[in-house]
Image: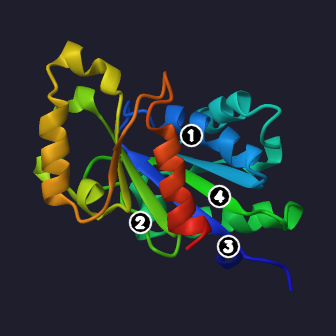
């Protein structure tokens, strides 16, 4: 019997536009591949393949072009990850036709703190990415994206001094509103990326 999406580990990466989801993917995917994993990537967008094309360029020579795909939701991206994930599930099944050895699929989607939550059938493990530039009050606003994700990623820490964001306040509030882990990251220097990888491995690959 041919494998289906139920046979492949999946990680959802959500967050608002500009939070650094694509930069995070750019750091995570090559390291996952170097660890010997066959990785696919799906980028959700409303009407274009722009995000997927950008990822194909970034992953050239790392991930086969046939394992980077765009899903055009035709509506707010959260429709394709939360209300009706069928398009994404079909894309994973399409990956498996050509790549039955696939180990892991990462699914990126934009969305605000209320919208970017993943249907459990689509994502075995979910990350929600915020930027310190959005304000250090984001964690304590307690949106489902921040509270319910498996791992909260507080990104762009290098910008904190320039936007008057207090990382200690964000740390305190994230700890207060969440039962699960959170990680501070700076994708430019790769600070925190190893910790994100450890959480992904522990949460979905070795669970």
- Per the model, the C-alpha gap separating discs 3 and 1 is 20 Å
Circles 3, 4 touching at the beta carbon (< 8 Å): yes
Q: Residue at x 26, y 50 (%)?
A: 113
Crowding at mark 4 (Cα within 10 Å: few <14, some 14-19, many 20+)? many
- Per the model, the C-alpha gap separating discs 1 and 2 is 20 Å
**In the picture, residue 97 is in which quadrant?**
bottom right
Q: Which numbered disc, 3 or 1, marks the residue closer to the eye? A: 1
- Per the model, the C-alpha gap separating discs 2 and 4 is 17 Å
Q: Secondary structure at mark 1?
A: helix
Q: In the rendered view, how is the structure colored?
A: rainbow
Q: Earlier in the sequence, mark 4 or mark 1?
A: 1
Q: Is residue 125 above or below residue 13?
A: below
Q: Quadrant of the N terminus?
A: bottom right
Q: Which numbered disc, 2 or 3, marks the residue closer to the eye? A: 3
Circles 2, 3 touching at the beta carbon (< 8 Å): no
Crowding at mark 3 (Cα within 10 Å: few <14, some 14-19, many 20+)? many
Q: Which residue is mark 3?
A: 5
């Amino acid at each position: 019997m041919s494998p289906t999406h139920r046979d492949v580990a999946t990680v959802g990466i959500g967050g608002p536009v500009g939070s650094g989801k694509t930069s995070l993917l750019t750091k995570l995917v090559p390291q996952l591949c170097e660890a010997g994993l066959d990785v696919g990537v799906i980028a959700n967008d409303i009407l274009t393949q722009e995000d997927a094309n950008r990822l194909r360029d970034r992953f050239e020579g790392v991930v086969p072009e046939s394992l980077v795909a765009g899903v055009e939701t035709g509506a707010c991206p959260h429709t394709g990850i939360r209300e009706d994930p069928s398009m994404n599930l079909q894309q994973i099944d399409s990956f498996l036709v050509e790549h039955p050895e696939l180990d892991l699929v990462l699914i990126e989607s934009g969305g605000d703190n209320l919208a970017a939550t993943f249907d459990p059938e689509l994502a075995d493990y979910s990350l929600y990415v915020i930027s310190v530039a959005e304000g250090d009050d984001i964690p304590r606003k307690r949106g489902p994206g921040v509270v319910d994700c498996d791992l909260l990623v507080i990104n762009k820490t290098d910008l904190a001094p320039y936007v008057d964001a207090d990382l200690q306040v964000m740390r305190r509030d994230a700890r207060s509103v969440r039962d699960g882990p959170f990680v501070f990251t700076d994708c430019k220097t790769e600070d925190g990326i190893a910790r994100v990888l450890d959480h992904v491995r522990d949460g979905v690959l070795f669970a």
